[in-house]
Image: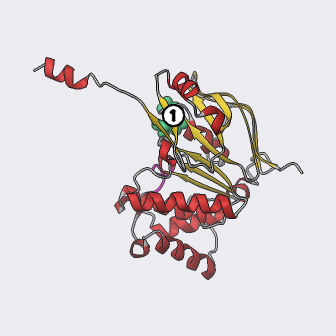
Amino acid sequence: MTRDTVVKVKDLSCISGKRYLLKDINWEVKKGDRWVVFGMNGCGKTTLLSIIAGFKDYSKGELEVLGESYTPKNTLAIRKKIGWVSSSFFDKYYHQEIALDIVLSGIFGSLGIDYLVTNRDIIRAKELLSELRLGDKINSPFDLMSKGEQQNVLIARALVSNPEILVLDEPGTGLDVFAREYLLSTVKDLSVNTDTTIIYVTHYTEEILDVFDQALLLKYGQVYAKGLTQDIFNDKTISSFLNYPVRVNQEREHYSISMEVKSKISDMLVRSR
Ligand SMILES: Nc1ncnc2c1ncn2[C@@H]1O[C@H](COP(=O)(O)OP(=O)(O)OP(=O)(O)O)[C@@H](O)[C@H]1O
């Protein structure tokens, strides 16, 4: 039996002014897939995921999520089925909102609580916050929380609706050592025990768990490679992708990349004294 396609991106471009932030992206994600998205700063990862999560428009091409194209009428309904963590996106929107309200907004796929919440919703949101060690921060405004606490609020927001698709944009950033392991263990458990589709963006190869069996490499807003992680994460492909010689190692449960980098900054500073 063929699995349903849950995200279909066809010849998609996103243009700002005269610049292509994304160009001719083609990508298909099936139900239950686990993808890692990898690329250098500014290559368009957040832009692509914001579009897929229904929070950003695109300029050209086609996008279907869970069998539908976004329209003003169905946007919230589709968003509800996507758990999206992206501090680079939400940081711009959340300021005075308290942790509990932000988590509850995930139930509606909105940025705020524009609809009626039930007691069950509140209990679930509080449980998730407590589980993520934020039980005492339920009423804290977003701006007054630490980076890691904010990230955990966004993780709780993404999980509260028990989503069909989890889109995690650098979810480990800012987390302490325990919180990051807890996140990775949650992602791993979800991928083993449920058919949740997972798309995971990271810069840190130690977060590329063995469960992420497919990889999308983005470079300058375009797809550089996509396919099985084991076929892509090798010395040759990643060195050519990064334009720099690296060694890719597959450890017991994740990948790692080693490279020799020599900074010139200290020499520059010493010379200018
Ligand atoms: N609204 C916008 N208008 C114009 N340019 C934008 C806009 N949003 C993002 N960009 C630019 O698009 C490029 C891609 O940004 P994006 O945030 O998608 O990159 P990224 O791959 O997620 O980067 P990082 O790894 O640093 O988070 C960047 O050069 C950024 O400056």
Q: Position of residue 57 (x, y in %)?
A: 65, 40
Q: For the residue marked with disc 1, what is the amino acid?
A: Val
| Residue closest to the far front | 252
| Residue closest to the far right | 1
> Badge 1 is on which residue?
248
Q: Is residue 170 depicted above or below 226 in this figure?
A: below
| Residue closest to the far left | 273
- Residues packed near mark 1 inside 10 Å, few (<14), some (14 to 19) or many (20 plus): some
Q: Nearer the viewer, residue 217 or 91?
A: 217
Q: Position of residue 267 (x, y in %)?
A: 20, 21
Q: Position of residue 240 (x, y in %)?
A: 54, 22
| Residue closest to the far bottom | 119
Residue 123 relative to residue 81: left or right: left
Residue 98 relative to residue 218: left or right: left
Magenta run includes residue 54: no
Q: Secondary structure at mark 1?
A: strand
- Point 46% across, 56% down: residue: 94
Q: Main secondary structure of the magenta part?
A: loop
- Point 57% across, 77% down: residue: 122
Q: Which residues, given as a range, are shown in magenta? A: 90-94
Q: Position of residue 59 (x, y in %)?
A: 68, 31
- Point 39% across, 75% down: residue: 136
